Amino acid sequence: KTILEVSGLRAAVEGVEILKGVDLVVKRGEVHAIMGTNGSGKSTFAKVLAGHSAYQVTGGSVLFEGRNLFDLEPEERARAGVFLAFQYPIEIPGVSNSHFLRLAYNTLQSQRGKDELDPLEFEDFVREKMKLLEMNPNFLDRGVNEGFSGGEKKRNEILQMALLEPRLAILDETDSGLDIDALRIVTNGVNKLATKDNAIILVTHYQRMLNYIEPDYVHVMRSGRIVKTGGKELALDLETRGYDWVGVERRVSA
Ligand code: ADP
Ligand code: MG
Ligand code: MG
């Protein structure tokens, strides 16, 4: 029941190799946290999985449910059930969030050969999801990401994920402008939306995340590789000891 299998993944941006052999296996029903200091390659990893055009894959492989992820265009990845939050961070002033969300939802439904929802049906559906996420319905009437705070953008991201019901969601906590409130929103969303059939990869450098969520695995990225994997206790270790010791034990004990 493996959903994602990353083997020896290497990737470069502007000719500089950033990912230097990432290995990761994610199975159905699992929540994985990828942590690490600034510049360790976390966001690059997420963007490479998303198919961001600035990044060149220079080695290794990524299988999504047994298929070569890189054979799929970004839209096809979404259809296959991969959700990458930052695929939809755009601001669209004048277009209401509910209209935008319905469009995104219906596009995916029709691509999957399923029924689209009319505005009234969608309204019921989205309100149900918003109740689950404890979100204010006013949110639907605002312009897409227009003047949204960092926390509101995150909330929107989680709502999109709730609507699209992906098999694999990859959420990148970009470093800037996120406060404790945004962190709480994301982690609540993950807790509510994680099922035995899907998997979630949460990319973060916030060790406080562990106050809100219990990932099955915590990975530490360092210089473009995953250098250590553990359970949630690893994140607690990181909180007290920092990152400097990770991945250098062999040198220390030699
Ligand atoms: P993290 O998310 O862990 O903070 P990033 O993946 O954002 O790390 O960055 C990893 C390294 O790649 C950094 O040294 C960063 O400067 C470099 N990098 C990332 N994106 C680009 C880019 N578009 N052009 C040049 N260098 C980049
Ligand atoms: Mg960073
Ligand atoms: Mg980052």
Image (tube, helix red, strand yellow):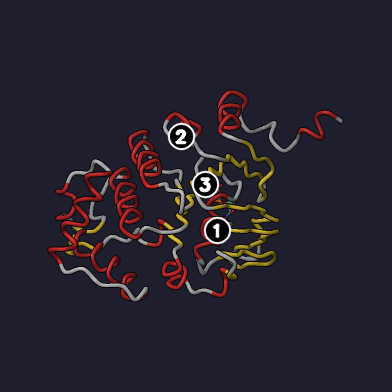
Task: Kindly tell me whether mark 3's CB lies below 8 Å from ligand 1.
Answer: no
The answer to whether 228 is drawn above or below residue 120 in the figure is: above
Residue holding disc 3: 30
The answer to whether 123 is drawn above or below residue 222 in the figure is: below
| Tag nearer the camera, 1 or 2 | 1
> Which amino acid type is shown beneath numbered disc 3?
Glu
Label 3, label 1: how far apart the Cα atoms are: 10 Å
Q: For numbered disc 2, what is the local secondary structure?
A: helix
Residue holding disc 2: 209
Decide which of tag 1 and tag 2 comes sooner along the chain.
1
Q: Which mark is residue 3?
A: 1
**What residue lies at 23% left-to-right and 48% top-to-bottom?**
130
**What residue lies at 45% left-to-right and 47% top-to-bottom?**
174
The answer to whether 118 is drawn above or below residue 160 in the figure is: below
**What residue lies at 54% left-to-right and 61% top-to-bottom?**
49
> Which amino acid type is shown beneath numbered disc 2?
Met
**Could you say where residue 96 lies in the image, as x and y percent from the top left?**
17, 61
Q: Does the CB distance between marks 3 and 1 fall below 8 Å?
A: no
Q: Label 2 neighbourhood size at 10 Å, few (<14), some (14-19), many (20+)? A: some
**What residue lies at 72% left-to-right and 38% top-to-bottom?**
247
Which quadrant does the N terminus fall into? Answer: bottom right
